[in-house]
Image (cartoon, rainbow, N blue to C red):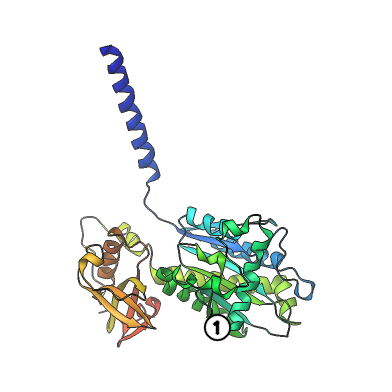
């Protein structure tokens, strides 16, 4: 009996040790920037068919070109929601991104209208403020009618009912600023580099963005129904240019939020030598922890133990900042601390003379 118990205990401890080894192997430090690329529509859902072109084919072509360019870069991992002509339900697309623990979700589409409307626009999740934005969201969300049991999957959501969209704006509030940052880069590239008409960065209730727990954008690359823009988007040259502009925007975004800067500084420094300061004249770096409509007291218990959190009212929202320094090395150390304390989505922001500027702009300033 005692022998059998001894064998049982030995087996149990071996089992625990194997589990520990398994978890240890899977708990690797994050060293890659993960981008999930989503080609709108697909399979039995062609999307819009303006001028006889198929939105699903154009969106897929642009996405594959974006992915091919990003895959050539060190430190970037690309995941596709679809890389062929297949139908993927909207909820499954966000699930793919969440399972991958992605840093970005980028969905590409083409627009349509009953006029000769033209130009590009990039959306983030939110409550539409105009009837026009509502119409775009309705068109993109109507794909759920092609899914079985869509009433159950989407909790009775009706793309044609304005009431269904109420409350959607809160779903991605934590990531709103980062989503807008990427959307702004995209639109500026389309406008400045490609000379496309800028229809702006907008908010609307897109189901494909609703459940993605990371910064997310939906890009409308232009109108297939326009007699000039449709053929441009259907051409290889047009698709190459649109893809290149989006790749550049993703690169700008990744560099701005500095996800791995501290690790790269540490890996290039001797462990026996202190890292030198990098003081940028006239610049104040801070860590943005969160943003929302709720006004919180800046006490440590509200911010997972972090002290000296600052609250500011900007763009109709409360934003919460940690740390304030002109030392770029120091702010990266504080950023690392914030992430360890439970703010993995926090990011570095920069101010000059009280106004927010991009980190890239700040790093062009004079170093003391």
Say above or below: 75 vs 184. above
Where in the figure is residue 204, as x and y percent of width and height? 54, 75
- Sort mark 1 into few (<14), some (14-19) or many (20+) by Cα contacts within 10 Å: some
Where in the figure is residue 246, as x and y percent of width and height? 56, 71
Q: Is residue 205 visible?
A: no
Q: Residue at x 31, y 14 (%)?
A: 4
Q: Nearer the viewer, residue 55 or 149?
A: 149
Q: Nearer the viewer, residue 114 or 63?
A: 114
Q: If the image is split into quadrants, where does the C terminus sit?
A: bottom left
Where in the figure is residue 24, as x and y percent of width and height? 35, 41
Q: Which residue is mark 1?
A: 200
Q: Is residue 2 visible?
A: yes
Q: Quadrant of residue 10?
A: top left
Q: Is residue 85 left or right of residue 317?
A: right
SS at circle 1: strand
Residue found farthest to the right: 52
Q: Nearer the viewer, residue 8 or 244?
A: 8
Number of labels in the image equals 1
Q: Residue at x 33, y 76 (%)?
A: 319
Q: Nearer the viewer, residue 46 or 80?
A: 46
Where in the figure is residue 18, as x and y percent of width and height? 36, 32
Q: Quadrant of residue 117?
A: bottom right
Q: Residue at x 36, y 51 (%)?
A: 29
Q: If the image is split into quadrants, where does the N terminus sit?
A: top left
Q: Residue at x 55, y 69 (%)?
A: 247
């Amino acid at each position: 009996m005692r022998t059998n118990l001894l064998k049982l205990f030995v087996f149990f401890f071996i089992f625990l040790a194997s589990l520990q080894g398994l978890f240890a192997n899977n708990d690797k430090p994050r060293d890659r920037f993960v981008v999930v690329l989503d080609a709108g529509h697909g399979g039995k859902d062609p999307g819009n068919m303006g001028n006889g072109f198929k939105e699903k084919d154009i969106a897929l072509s642009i996405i594959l070109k974006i992915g091919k360019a990003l895959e050539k870069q060190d430190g970037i991992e690309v995941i596709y929601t679809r890389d062929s002509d297949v139908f993927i339900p909207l909820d499954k697309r966000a699930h793919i991104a969440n399972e991958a623990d992605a840093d970005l979700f980028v969905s590409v589409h083409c627009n349509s209208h009953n006029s000769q409307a033209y130009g590009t626009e990039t959306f983030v999740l939110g409550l539409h403020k105009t009837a026009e934005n509502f119409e775009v969201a309705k068109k993109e969300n109507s794909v759920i009618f092609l899914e079985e049991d869509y009433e159950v999957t989407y909790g009775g959501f009706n793309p044609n009912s304005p009431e269904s969209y109420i409350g959607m704006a809160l779903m991605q509030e934590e990531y709103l600023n980062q989503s807008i940052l990427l959307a702004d880069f995209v639109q500026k590239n389309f406008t400045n580099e490609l000379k496309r008409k800028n229809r702006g960065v907008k908010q609307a209730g897109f189901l494909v963005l609703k459940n993605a727990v990371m910064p997310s954008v939906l890009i409308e690359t232009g109108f297939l129904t326009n007699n000039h823009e449709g053929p441009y988007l259907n051409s290889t040259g047009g698709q190459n240019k649109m893809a290149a502009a989006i790749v550049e925007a993703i690169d700008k975004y990744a560099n701005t939020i500095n996800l791995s800067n501290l690790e790269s500084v540490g890996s290039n420094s001797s462990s026996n030598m202190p890292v030198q300061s990098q003081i940028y004249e006239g610049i104040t770096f801070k860590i943005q922890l969160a943003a929302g409509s709720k006004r919180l007291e800046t006490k440590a218990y509200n911010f997972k133990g972090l002290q000296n959190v600052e609250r500011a009212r900007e763009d109709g929202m409360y934003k919460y900042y940690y740390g304030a320094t002109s030392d770029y090395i120091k702010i990266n150390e504080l950023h690392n601390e914030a992430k360890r304390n439970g703010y993995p989505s926090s990011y570095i922001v920069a101010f000059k003379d009280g106004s927010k500027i991009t980190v890239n702009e700040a790093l062009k300033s004079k170093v003391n």
